[in-house]
Amino acid sequence: MNDDDPFLTEEEQALHARLKLLQLEHADLDASIDALSRMPVPDQLMIARLKRKKLVLRDEITRIEDRILPDIIA
């Protein structure tokens, strides 16, 4: 679905924009964790903190996706 779709409400457009932002941040954290893990002496504390933040982002992404596409039982 296109974000410029005129049938989306302002709230839905805001949710889509927030979702894209969170997905980008999640991917950035993944890249940061990967880069830190490849260091000769990885900072395990920093990696753990980034992983926790990544999990929080994943939870928020899931909540937004559920609001955009609710689970409809037919």
Image (spheres, grey):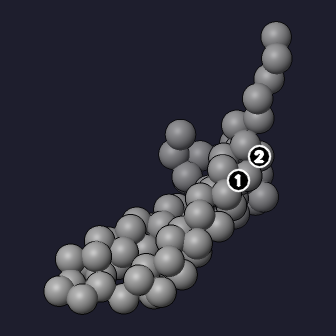
**Could you tell me if the residues under marks 1 and 2 are in contact, i.e. CB atoms within 8 Å?**
yes
Q: Is residue 27 above or below residue 2?
A: below
1 relative to 65 in the view: left or right: left
- Towards the viewer: 6 or 69: 69
How far across and how far down the image is residue 55, in percent? 59, 64
- Residue marked by disc 1: 64
x 21%, y 77%: residue? 38
Q: Bin the neighbour count of mark 2 within 10 Å (Cα to Cα): few under 14, some 14-19, many 20 and up.
A: few
Q: CA distance from mark 1 to mark 2?
A: 5 Å
Q: Label 2's element?
A: helix
The quadrant where residue 58 appears: bottom right
Question: In the rendering, at what x and y percent does residue 20 appear?
Answer: 52, 62
- Residue 13 seen in the current view: no
Could you tell me the amino acid type at mark 2?
A: Arg
The residue shown at (50%, 77%) is 48
Q: Residue furthest left?
A: 40
Does residue 37 show up?
Answer: yes
Mark linked to residue 67: 2
**Residue 54: percent from left, percent from top:** 54, 68
Q: Quadrant of residue 49?
A: bottom right
Residue in view at x 29 percent, y 71 percent = 34
- Percent across and percent down for residue 12 are 72, 53
Q: Residue at x 65, y 67 (%)?
A: 56
Q: Amino acid at mark 1?
A: Ile
Q: Estimate how packed mark 1 is, as few (under 14), some (14 to 19) or many (20 or more) residues with alpha carbons within 10 Å.
A: some
Which quadrant: the C terminus? top right
Q: Is residue 7 above or below residue 74?
A: below
Determine which of the numbered discs, if any, sits on residue 48 in the image. none
Q: Residue furthest right?
A: 73
